[in-house]
């Protein structure tokens, strides 16, 4: 397939590389063009604008936030200004509101829109081991499958409305944050009673909480290694704000969301913008007089 | 070894059966004596009092709450009234305060006390697949190991102070409750945006949250099967009260504990005492106008 | 003075009437022009656009939300398109972000901007008994004083940066909401123990909590009179969203804000959009199994 | 009347002095007898035991907590061991559970029990300006009225079941704590936006929140004067524990209770046992990076 790709940050660059490696014709665009150099060296075409990247069968976008995706869609020479509307697959973690707006905008101009945010860190992206959470019209999803196969280990279809993929992705990030919160509360209780954090965490992960999130973030909490940030607290806060906007729009009380949001604010206020989002563990311990 | 066993409820009966099956000499006592009949038929001796059950090498207790354990220890013909103090292994989910009181009482009368609460439901108990979380003096724990081997699949030693095992057990129960809470919040958000609960849960357990708690309780939340209760809400509330007492005594703020406690209260107030502790999922959905 | 007035809703209409009654020359504009008819009959001039209303010494605005104020400022023939920039006094409950944006926009075009939101319901507005909370440059505030005197019983100056008046106003609304929340929790506890709500509330207001908010909202909670709404729950939710945005921007954890926001969401989800914001009292009682 | 009085701490001593000053025959008992010396010098009789103090028409008790009241009632030569059961008026802030237990114990031995906790600090007690919140049988309350008149400025009858007075008293203390919490949150938001705490507090108390609690505690929060403690955080925590026990027993979710309890724990953990309960204001500011 002819696949366009917009957004060559750490995640996007790794994903685009796998699209190329899977044998697809790739056309890339990035705001800072030099990020595309090595992909071009390997055979990718360089587009002069998002719109030009959107002239193939599918165009995928991987951008940092709503504003960046809005810019490449609605801005000058944006994807929605192109003459031959493509199928746009958005891989970014964005708000439900933007997903809905894009769905309507594409419908209005004769194009198609699919939301397919991914779970996985940059190393999983590089290894084409992402989990893809997709939502959209069934025939659109079928057309996207070769792309998903090139970048991930498994695709989950969660609905026919694109924003439904976003609600699942945001919920997943909420649950990661909530797991960090609750593990940190329990580890602090244990620590103040003389139980080693590592001993406590071993019991949890070897018995009831053996999943990836508890293993990986449990390890960070045990080691209290919050810098350098793998995912900085302000980014976590942004995601929690998107969860909050979805909860408000659909009238869903989420009390634990309030708790983690406040701890992220406190982490940033007390520790600075460069702490990892798991750094709420440091705040939770400090609130109990530790550290 | 000569092992005494006090408390033949659903969990205790299954555990005692495995002690016997492992070839140990077993002496049992239960407030309602008929619960011991089948064990006696298989070769166990029947004690006339807790004190008599405590005359062997080790006496294990598995009781419903602090009050029941206090009664068999400090009551008439209780374990602490015996002349030849044994090594007492408490398997129950009790308060840190009681564990500390028992440790002191046994030290005062020349006996030994080990806390070894277990993770696992009745079916795991019957299959000798419990996880044993133990704390106490190292030599005492060595003496207990044949008992632990007879009833569980693995033993975790978390400290040399008995109550430390209880803080780990209580923390584990808190994390189960907190996981139910946060999954239910996320599932409600998804549901109000048209995502099937089953689809959402599949994404979570097949990617980031593959542990037992998320699989088992996730299934209950998807099926909304809260009755009959496997573990009734008032029992969950009791455990959360014990967590709260430990948090208060050691000065640890635990905001998510407050959230789950309130939801358990609401579940009991609105749904009755017979709902499962995962029934907070029903409350969380109802608070968002569902169901 | 020549005073322009934009926004003749329930509050704005009452305020503008007092400006006229105080002897000022008044020019009014409202999106629905008929709202101005009676004021014109009493001597006010009718402007054809916000910009025209802004040609006097001062222009005051009283609008429902950020969007409405943005429209009259930045829209076609808006206040900021006028040739002779006036002193703009914003009386609305708006976000800090918009207050800061307006301050900058006015500074850029040579005008002046003052924020002066008010406390008081429509009856206080009609009686010129509002409390005015003002912030801005000292000389600008002096110029505004005749206006404030015409509409309120007292003016509080809280800073020289306009958005500081908005943070005080939003904080006040948060405290009203929080007082409703906590009174409702206490009344529910009392009611479930057989204490009459009225008896409980009398003790509170006649001893420690004699202020207006506790008297007025306490009465609503005792009478459980949540409809028709004096201030509907979705408006309360909007204000709490603005508080949340301010808290997030300035990195301030506000756990009680999360609690009231969730109860507002639950009130709207379960009771509908037409319930008063004090209707969280009904939710809090229902969560305890009452009503 | 012949009035006995047990418990001559700071509050009790002041109250007993007013009983004497009002012309009643007073018999006093205190664990540390020297606290009674000046009252005896003024004409009070000294009892050798609580039981002896209970031989008059009415015996009033003012003690620090449940344990102290239990000791003087159920202990050796306690009030309930006396031969001629009196009418016992409990002025202390105690649990509902103890009030109910005492009601039953007095009914069983032919005596009468009234609960009448008071609002007011030691200076109000000394000035006979307490607010008395009373519950019990109507005829018993009539008999107590001369006592109430001697010590307070006003009596509120809230029910015929003694523990109902305690639920109102505990609710009042919860609302004080909650008001400190929410004012501190708002003041922190204001402070981080450059608004002076004093300016903010003046707006609040001069407009919507003019009651005693907001004036008095608002002043403490503005001055950030948390030591020496007027009412130490551990005492506040004890009261919140009693509120929590009442809420749990009557199945009432109280989310703001969880918030204040956690802040009290954090205040004690980070600042020590000697900080005033309003010291949660320091924690709330610190959580936002202030101070």
Image (spheres, coloured by chain):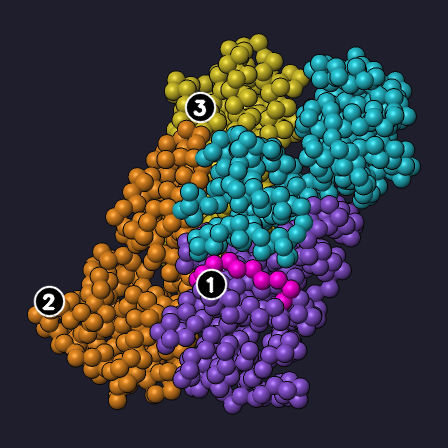
Chain colours: A purple, B cyan, C orange, D yellow
Q: Which residue is mark 3?
A: D161
User: In the rendered image of this protein, does residue A271 appear above or below residue A35?
Assistant: above
Q: Which mark is residue D253?
A: none
Foreground disc of the pair 1, 2 = 1
Q: Left or right: C26 with respect to A203?
A: left
Is B221 rendered above or below residue D101?
below
Which chain's residue wears label 1?
A
- Kindly identify which residue carries mark 1: A138
The residue tagged 2 is: C38
Image location (x, y in percent) of residue C106: 35, 83
In what quadrant of the picture does the N terminus of chain C appear?
bottom left
| Kind of element beneath mark 3 | loop
- Crowding around mark 2 (Cα neighbors within 10 Å: few <14, some 14 to 19, many 20+) is few
The boundaries of the magenta stretch are A152-164
Image point (37%, 35%), residue name: C291
Closer to the camera in the image, C259 or D257: C259
Distance, label 1 to label 2, CA atoms, is 59 Å
Identify the element where label 1 is drawn: helix
From the image, give the main secondary structure of the stretch colored magenta: strand
Tell me how far mark 1 sits from mark 3, CA to CA: 66 Å
Q: Disc 1 vs disc 3: Cβ atoms closer than 8 Å?
A: no
Cα distance between the residues tagged 3 and 2: 59 Å
Q: Position of residue D81 (x, y in %)?
A: 61, 13
The residue located at (52%, 30%) in the rendering is B273
Quarter holding residue A289:
bottom right
Mark 3, residues whose alpha carbon is within 10 Å: few (<14), some, or many (≥20)? many
């Amino acid at each position: 397939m002819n696949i366009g790709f917009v957004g060559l940050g750490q995640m996007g660059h790794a994903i685009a590389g796998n699209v190329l490696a899977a044998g697809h014709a790739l056309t890339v665009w990035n705001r800072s063009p030099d990020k595309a150099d090595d992909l071009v060296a390997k055979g990718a075409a360089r587009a002069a604008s998002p719109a030009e990247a959107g002239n193939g069968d599918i165009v995928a976008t991987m951008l940092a936030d709503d504003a960046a995706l809005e810019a490449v869609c609605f801005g000058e020479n944006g994807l929605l200004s192109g003459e031959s509307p493509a199928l746009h697959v958005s891989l970014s973690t964005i708000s439900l509101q933007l997903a809905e707006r894009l769905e309507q905008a594409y419908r209005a101009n004769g194009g198609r829109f699919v939301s397919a945010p991914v779970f996985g860190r940059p190393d999983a992206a590089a290894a084409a081991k992402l989990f893809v959470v997709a939502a959209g019209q069934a025939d659109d999803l079928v057309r996207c499958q070769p792309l998903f196969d090139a970048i991930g280990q498994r695709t989950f279809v969660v609905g026919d409305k694109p924003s439904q993929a976003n609600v699942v992705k945001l919920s997943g990030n909420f649950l990661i944050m909530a797991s960090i919160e609750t593990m940190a509360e329990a580890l602090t209780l244990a620590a103040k009673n003389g139980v080693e954090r590592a001993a406590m965490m071993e019991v949890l992960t070897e018995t009831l909480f053996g999943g990836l999130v508890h293993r990986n973030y449990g390890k960070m909490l045990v080691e209290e290694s919050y810098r350098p940030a793998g995912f900085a607290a302000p980014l976590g806060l942004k995601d929690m704000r998107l969860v909050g906007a979805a909860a408000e729009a659909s009238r869903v009380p989420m009390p634990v969301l309030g708790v983690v949001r406040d701890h992220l604010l406190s982490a940033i206020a007390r520790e600075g913008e460069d702490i990892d989002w798991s750094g709420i563990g440091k705040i939770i311990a400090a609130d109990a007089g530790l550290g």
